Image (spheres, rainbow, N blue to C red):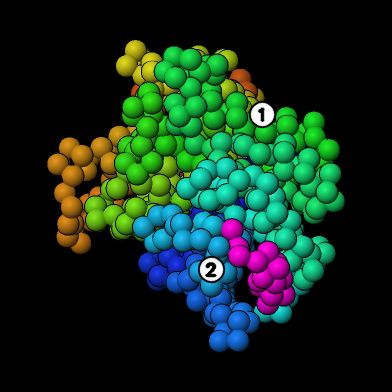
């Protein structure tokens, strides 16, 4: 069977929190991403936050549950082809053991006062989903317990208490239906994966998948400058593969692996680490990072969920600028960043995999992927030097030979899309004009045009079973090609000028 790309990055797209998905513009942004890329699941925080009005404690002490806002969100997601990847958090105040919160919107991160009540909430919620959407549909969803419990900001207790939270949630989900899928630990930095598997194996606790998170700048947080054991630019690949190896050697080697958060936030050193003002999610760097890493990790996991879809996002308060150096694929105005364009081009890499080269043939930190979809050849080239060496990186003059089935002289129509500074990545242009804040509709349209990759159409001739692609890429640029064979020129509408000229000559001769 012909090998194809798995595209695990298409499995999940994320949004900041549940309440954001009640906004019309957020759903418009997700609908655009569905049209251009096509994801399968959507994950987000704070499903049980009090702004969702889920839990009410009655005067007699009993809990009453309300699902209205959750239903509106799930209905909207399903209507555009997105299934929920359900993150079971945060703790409703009526059930919380403490007052510690996280983020601008004050997500409660404390354990429940009663684990029986926590389990009851999860069971009632799961049963409601089955009643509303049908058991066959909900069995295709994922239920993930909490978010980054290994970080004190997100979980006020410890690992043992998280395992208690997890086991009661798993019990609640499985009471509703034994075939619903439950997993975790949703940790930062690939942590607790082996420990979670061992805990569940030892205690007969259901575990259908593992989930965790990673960001490139975790490397600078973990190691002193110059002391990382990873080769420059390879940390993210190494951490994803290490979790794959940990699961394979565990008591549950066949578990699905879901990276439910990651993005391109990077830093040159520890002092430069920033979670709320990081240029490497907004500029051209993001495009080449995405292409390199998504091709390298195509077989390393079941999902790689980009955090997040849109800059309409309020962990630190809403951004007031067209660019916020925030996490979104789309700006507040819904314009695609370089990161979004990288995924748009990756989504076009369908068909039989001919080549997926990671730096060995073309030189360090660059590569090409080639597929054949029917008669159409597709090629995606990237150039991504590490931050520590980018100033010494030279332009890559590429010269790539693509195999074609015919050895005859066949014309190909070559359409290309190029992501580079100022075209396909308009962050650089916005900076050059002093980062204007309030944009007029006309200015938004101008930036919208710059947000699209540069497109060209040309012809190429296949000779001796080969097609040549030649050109140049600067660091952090990405270029995509589609090459489609053209039929022989025939006389008639749509034929070339030479054919029409020959016909005119014959007609004129017959008249004379």
Give residue 506's quadrant in the image. Answer: top left
> Principal SS element in the magenta part?
helix
Task: Answer whether labels 2 and 1 touch (C-beta < 8 Å).
Answer: no
The residue identified by callout 1 is: 242
Q: Residue 457: give x, y in percent of width and height.
A: 40, 39
Q: Earlier in the sequence, mark 2 or mark 1?
A: 2
Provide the residue span drawn in magenta. Answer: 111-128
Disc on res. 92: 2
Mark 2–mark 1 distance (CA, rounded to whole Å): 35 Å
Whether 27 is among the magenta residues is: no
* 133 left or right, relative to 338: right
* Residue 185 visible in the shown view: yes
Name the residue at 73% across, 48% down. Answer: 209
Q: Residue at x 53, y 25 (%)?
A: 235
Residue 212 drawn at (x, y percent):
61, 43
The vertical placement of 407 against 118, above or below, is above
Percent of width and height locating residue 20: 43, 65
Q: Identify the residue at horizontal 73%, vertical 30% (top origin).
A: 245
Q: Is residue 469 left or right of residue 375?
A: left
Left or right side of 329 for 150: right
Q: Nearer the viewer, residue 224 or 98?
A: 98
Res. 499 in view: no
């Amino acid at each position: 069977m012909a090998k194809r790309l798995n595209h695990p990055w298409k499995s999940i797209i994320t949004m900041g929190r549940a309440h954001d998905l009640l906004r019309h513009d957020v759903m418009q942004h997700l609908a655009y991403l569905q049209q251009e890329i096509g994801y399968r699941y959507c994950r987000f925080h704070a499903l049980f936050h009090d702004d969702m009005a889920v839990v009410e404690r009655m005067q007699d002490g009993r809990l009453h549950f309300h699902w209205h806002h959750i239903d509106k969100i799930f209905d909207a997601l399903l209507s555009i082809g997105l299934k929920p990847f359900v993150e079971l958090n945060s703790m409703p105040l009526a059930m919380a053991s403490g007052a510690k919160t996280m983020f601008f919107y004050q997500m409660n991160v404390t354990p429940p006062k009663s684990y029986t009540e926590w389990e009851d909430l999860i069971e009632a919620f799961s049963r409601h989903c089955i009643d509303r959407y049908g058991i066959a549909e909900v069995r295709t969803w994922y239920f993930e317990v909490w978010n980054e419990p290994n970080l004190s900001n997100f979980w006020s207790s410890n690992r043992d208490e998280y395992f208690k939270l997890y086991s009661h949630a798993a019990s609640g989900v499985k009471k509703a239906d034994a075939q619903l899928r439950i997993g975790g630990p949703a940790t930062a930095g690939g942590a607790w994966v082996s420990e979670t598997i061992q805990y569940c194996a030892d205690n007969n606790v259901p575990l259908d998948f593992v989930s965790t998170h990673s960001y490139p700048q975790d490397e600078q947080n973990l190691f002193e400058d110059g002391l990382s054991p990873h080769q420059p630019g390879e940390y993210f690949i190494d951490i994803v593969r290490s979790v794959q190896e940990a699961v394979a050697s565990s008591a549950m080697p066949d578990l699905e692996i879901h990276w439910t958060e990651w993005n391109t936030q990077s830093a040159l050193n520890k002092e430069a680490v920033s979670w709320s003002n990081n240029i490497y999610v907004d500029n051209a760097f993001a495009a080449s990072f995405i292409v390199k890493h998504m091709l390298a990790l195509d077989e390393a996991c079941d999902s790689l969920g980009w955090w997040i879809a849109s800059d309409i996002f309020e962990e630190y308060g809403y951004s007031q600028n067209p660019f916020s150096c925030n996490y979104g694929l789309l700006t507040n105005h819904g314009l695609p960043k370089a990161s979004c364009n990288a995924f748009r081009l990756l989504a076009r890499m369908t068909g039989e995999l001919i080549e997926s080269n990671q730096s060995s043939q073309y030189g360090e930190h660059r590569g090409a992927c080639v597929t054949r979809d029917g008669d159409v050849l597709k090629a995606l080239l990237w150039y991504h030097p590490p931050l520590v060496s980018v100033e010494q990186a030279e332009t890559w003059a590429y010269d790539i030979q693509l195999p074609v089935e015919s050895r005859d002289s066949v014309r190909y129509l070559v359409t290309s899309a190029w992501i580079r500074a100022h075209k396909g990545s308009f962050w650089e242009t916005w900076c050059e004009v002093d980062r204007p804040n309030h944009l007029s509709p006309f200015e938004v349209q101008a930036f919208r045009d710059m947000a699209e990759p540069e497109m060209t159409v040309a012809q190429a001739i296949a000779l001796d079973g080969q097609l040549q692609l030649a050109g140049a890429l600067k660091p952090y640029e990405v270029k995509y090609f589609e090459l489609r064979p053209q039929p022989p020129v025939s006389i008639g509408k749509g034929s070339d000028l030479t054919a029409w000229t020959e016909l005119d000559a014959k007609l004129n001769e017959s008249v004379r």
